[in-house]
Amino acid sequence: MKKIFFTAATMFALLHSFAQTAADTAGFKSRKLKVEEINLVSSYYNQNGNNAAVTGGIGTEKLTDIANVFDVKLIKYDNKYRKHSFDLELGIDHYTSASSDRIDLKANSSASSADTRIYPSINWSIENEKKRKTFGLGVSSSTEFDYQSFGANINFAKKTKNKNGEFTAKVQAYLDQVSLVLPIELRVNSGGYGKNNYPKVARNTFAASISYSQIINEKLNIMFIADAVQQNGYLSLPFHRVYFYDSTVHQEKLPSSRFKIPLGFRANYFLGDKFIIKTYYRFYKDDWGITAHTANIESPIKITPFISVSPFYRYYTQTAAKYFGAYKTHSIQDQYYTSNYDMSNFSSSFMGAGIRLAPPTGVFGLKHLSM
């Protein structure tokens, strides 16, 4: 499979109307809500391949996606000098998918050939700098034609006495509704289907995460991460076909429960003022039979005080889920079955580079555009 991914990010620092006063610089912490930063991230993604799950593990996987995320960060201090942070985010993705368009094999083009996803979120946190504690809450949603998701999270962080270490815990829940958009030949009563008229089923995800970061010395800092994820409900994708060895076509069928355990380790080493080595390793295992390893290395290089380049490389490998089978390999004796190659045995390499520009006079001379 060939993939091309491009991301552009900009950061706006509002320097005039939200500038600090002389009292701020003297140590006074403003109690007024003010803008800390505004970020805009845009990306373009292009993919091609020949193992589409919509057509039973064969056929085009051509897909393009244009994503935009607008993010505003606000801060204020209350009368107890606790820092309140508000993060308001709005994301809008638009994609075209040749494989999704094959939900109806006879159509030249259908509504499933393209879709738009909208995903707003609001996060709030309160930090007590004296007690070195932070508590936060957040809510989010994601909407597209055949999927609706509502999420909520609670997080807590506590720094060590010398502030060189920090423990973080987070709990998340996502309550989703999946529209049963079946392949057209498997619809028993096609007359009952139409726009916004598909049956819906539930899919719920609950996740708990803990991490601990530690500054070892002025050059090295590390982090340990552990997650536990439980999913329940309808975990298949309704429009994924599975062709049995006798050429009959069926709808993907997977268990209604899945438990995942990812464990991660991160280490950053500073080789001086111009070089940083960032490494990351993750081990993953679930009760569907997938075991995976991810190794990532990134090395930001500061060319000038205002320009840096960050080449990176990631290697990923996984075993196949016990329910996976290629085109025409499943049989009626199988209790569960899928031909989705995301659950197959495979390895991948991902490489690229980022370029960061932060001129002191602002990008293109615009002081509000800082990075």
Image (cartoon, helix red, strand yellow):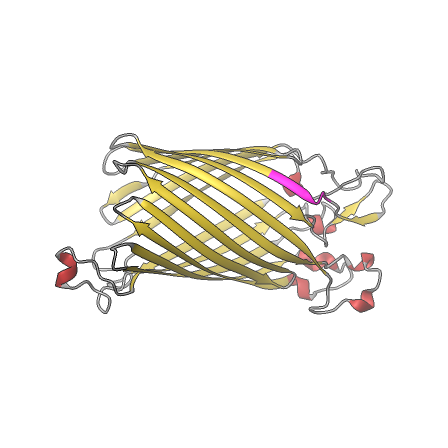
- Which residues are the magenta region? 254-259
Q: Is residue 366 visible?
A: no
Q: Is residue 5 visible?
A: yes
Image quadrant occupied by the N terminus: top right
Describe residue 273's horizontal placement relative to residue 293 as left or right: left
Please say if 185 is above or below 161: below
Describe residue 194's horizontal placement relative to residue 302 as left or right: right
The single residue placed furthest to the right in the displayed view is: 246
Residue 137 found in image quarter: bottom left
The single residue placed furthest to the front in the displayed view is: 80
Residue 327 found in image quarter: top right
Residue 122 percent across, percent down from the top left: 44, 60
Tally of numbered tags: 0
Residue 292 found in image quarter: top right
- Which residue is drawn at the image coordinates 51% and 49% (left, top)? 172
- Residue 255 belongs to the span the image colors magenta: yes
Residue 32 percent across, percent down from the top left: 26, 65
Describe residue 102's horizontal placement relative to residue 79 as left or right: right
The single residue placed furthest to the top in the displayed view is: 216
Residue 16 percent across, percent down from the top left: 21, 67
